[in-house]
Image (cartoon, rainbow, N blue to C red):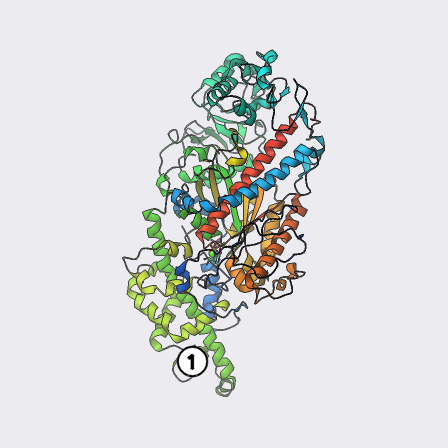
Amino acid sequence: MTEPFADSDSNAWQDLLRRMLPAGAPLPDDEQLDYSIAVEYKGPPLDFPVPVVDPLSSQHTLQKPPKYRKVPSVHSKFALHMTKNSSGSGSGSSSSASRLRNNSSSEFESKIPTDQSLSDLNNSGNVLTSDIDENVENEYEHDDDRYNSVARNEYNSLRSDYVDGKSLPVGEKDGKNDSLGDKVRVRVCSRCGKKSRLREREFCIVCGARYCRNCLLKAMGSMPEGRKCVGCIGETIDEANREKLGKCSRLLAKVCSPLEVKQIMKAESECLANQIQPEQVWVNGRPLREEELVELLGCAMSPQNLRPGKYWYDKDSGLWGKEGEKPDRIISSKLNVGGKLQIDASKGNTKVFINGREITKVEFRVLKLAKVQCQQGTHFWVYEDGSYEEEGQNNIRGNIWGKASTRFICSLFSLPVPPANVHGPKEDATAFSGGSIPEYLEHGRVQKLLLFGLEGSGTSTIFKQVKFMSKSKFTVDEVQNIKLTIQRNIYRYLSVLLEGREHFEEEALMDKGTSDLERENLSPVNSGETGTDGSRRCIYSINQRVKHFSDWLLEIIAMGDLDAFFPAATREYAPVVDEIWRDPAIQETYKRRGELHFLPDTANYFLDQALEISSNEYEPSERDILYAEGVTPSNGLASLEFSFDDHSPMSEIYGEDLESQPSWTKYQLIRISSKGVHDSGKWLEMFEDVKVVVFCVALSDYDLEWTRGDGTSENKMLASRDVFESLARHSSFEDASFVLLLNKYDSFEDKINQVPLTVCDWFHDFRPFRHRQNNQALANQAYYYVAVMFKQLYASITGKKLFVWPTRALERTSVDETFRYIREVLMWEEEKKRMYCMADDDSYSSTETD
Ligand SMILES: Nc1nc2c(ncn2[C@@H]2O[C@H](COP(=O)(O)OP(=O)(O)OP(=O)(O)O)[C@@H](O)[C@H]2O)c(=O)[nH]1
Ligand SMILES: [Ca+2]
């Protein structure tokens, strides 16, 4: 079940309804230091020199004339001044306020994800699939050039490192490739002996001879078997090149026509001589025979892109994997290939067996999520359709792939599932807004992006923005659910205010009337009640009618019955809500919302519209959805899929390089709630093929306190840093790139002049430039400083570079930019790998690195 009150933001300080100033973005990239926090400055023109920020050098210059960002006019309407108070509310009061306080934490706080909550994902209605909307894309086209320049700078710097043969800059090296820079040399054409630039050459897939542009066709002729020297035709290829078969290079595309290229590539990947040889493929402990390989490659669901290697195959279920590893895919069952499946084929240690193979930890967890009873020592038989039974009992117990949730979880954890038409009844597939899971998801042909952040950092907002930008908007059902959530939330916000009011009233009366109290010798328990009877009043006092409603509402919330009444009773009580919200005592209470832990920044936005929202005809606007809490489940995982269908801004760089990443690549955005991060150990290790970890930090959190699970508290920025650090150290993400989003840049700008950055211990040596400057310039410096602190931390842990980007998650454009940036990072990392790869398989420089 979804938990609509699971969302709690302690950082009530920020108010998203405050005025949105023209955006001042950070200074442009510093190429020298290779800090890719490159963004174009968009604030107002500066009337002073751009400051030099230690520890950056003085390379900052503005790349473009500054311009103003469009300010969405709607926001200014809600401009509001507020007092900020981040101290926690006092405790130790009596009455229903404290009675509620205990209960409210369990009521409002997110649940720790459990096997249960994950397996209930299908009920959450938040498993979404979509594609980026063309219209949205077009709106931001003008921003592309910036990304081009970011990418191009990095690309060029890497490229020059190669060409000049110097080693890579510190921070670009990661373990394995440390000495790479020294090994790479300028290549010499095997035919003419002339030196040429690294990428301007083609090589023979058999012998590795390299040819320059002038010699290529002379050395390779018409290429009937693809790129082989004429003398190598008929020979088997060097296996290291198998992955490159059929993928055209830049140089080839330059010397041949597109039609020729197509023919050559087809011949290269399909001609007999280039095919894998049976003895190169071992299945269940022995090499294949010719006819076995034919059967394997010719079956209906054959292992695609089969490479030489040792595999295991479970012919009953069709599961297939690399020796010693978890299942990788499902192929046709009942093939007569290889030896007998070994018990330790996948090196599992779970004491649970499927078709005689001890399964791996990941499989075990998925079975548990699928509610398959599996004690240690259980032996299952699983058939090709996913139906299973316990060994020795002639009784089918269910279908493993039957549940859409299981298939979804498998897709997250990169376990194979059979194609949709093979598996059993699609009982709950409709629970996923996108219908059943697309095939490419199930087969892992999607780039996984993992989105993390401490509570209140904005991950939900980012997730929703991506959803809005995607083609498949929220479905009718989803919107209906959101509507109910919003209607219910109103009562929750109201209850927080009423509870706070009670508390403040008590406090005020205590202060005012300590002496009264002593004289009357009343117990404090009763003082709250006497406060409302008119005899003793303060600004927090309310009339009897409101008091009745308040008692009732707080009571049902304390009993955990809110769901039972709302949203059903929404309309009936709407006028009361409206009245209470406008009550001066409540408005006074609202002014102290910094002390009200469970009141989100958006409460006033919704309470202001209580009447409209409560009507039957109410339809949540996009903004309502964006501001609403509890739309994305905060107690587990949510996932959505998107792609950019525009042309890649990198296309210029990749040029005609046909093997480069196609622009239609699909991305899967997986969001794990902050609670999921704390409880993470067991989940994180299952996300092993994540490409990018997107870590979201609210910049404006630097002066906020964060209460940990154990009740102790610390600065929220430090808490974020700790979670960030634990992710950076996590073995699952060794190969992933990290992108740090410094979110709530708008709040940050507002705050930075009032509260010095140094209130956070970690930033104690931040020394802003002394002369007078506006918020934007100061925010800029502070942003850079924070980014560098994170970069240094990350580099000290991983030796790698951290990518940093500023965001304002409430602005669609900003989120769009963010994901374009993330895509750049991805493409850039791929390109880097590709270049390492080319250097590695070079015949004269490969003194093996691993
Ligand atoms: N001013 C401002 N507010 C933001 C920004 N991004 C998010 N918020 C608000 O900050 C609050 C917390 O954001 P959420 O999206 O709920 O973030 P979250 O807490 O990480 O997500 P959950 O764990 O699902 O609650 C919400 O009230 C957002 O509307 C931003 O860039 N600027
Ligand atoms: Ca939240």
Q: Nearer the viewer, residue 53 or 12?
A: 53
Query: Could you tell me the amino acid type at mark 1?
Result: Gly
Q: Is residue 155 above or below residue 394?
A: below
Q: Quadrant of residue 737?
A: top right
Residue 362, percent from left and from top: 53, 37
Q: Is residue 595 above or below residue 537?
A: above
Q: Which residue is mark 1?
A: 531
Helix, strand or loop under label 1: helix
Q: Is residue 84 left or right of residue 240?
A: left
Residue 459 vs 358, above or below: the answer is below
* Residue 846 drawn above or below residue 43: above
Q: Residue at x 54, y 22 (%)?
A: 255
Crowding around mark 1 (Cα neighbors within 10 Å: few <14, some 14 to 19, many 20+) is: many
Q: Is residue 114 visible?
A: no
Which of the two residues, 110 or 276, is positioned nearer the viewer here? 276
Residue furthest bottom in the image: 519
Give the number of callouts.
1
Q: Is mark 1 within 8 Å of ligand 1?
A: no
Residue 97 appearing in the image: yes
The residue nearer to you, when weighing 146 against 779, is 146
Q: Nearer the viewer, residue 476 or 143?
A: 143
x and y, in percent, of residue 249 in the image: 55, 26
- Residue 730, percent from left and from top: 61, 44
Residue 553 screen position, x and y as percent: 37, 67
Question: Considering the image in quadrants, where does the C terminus appear?
Answer: top right
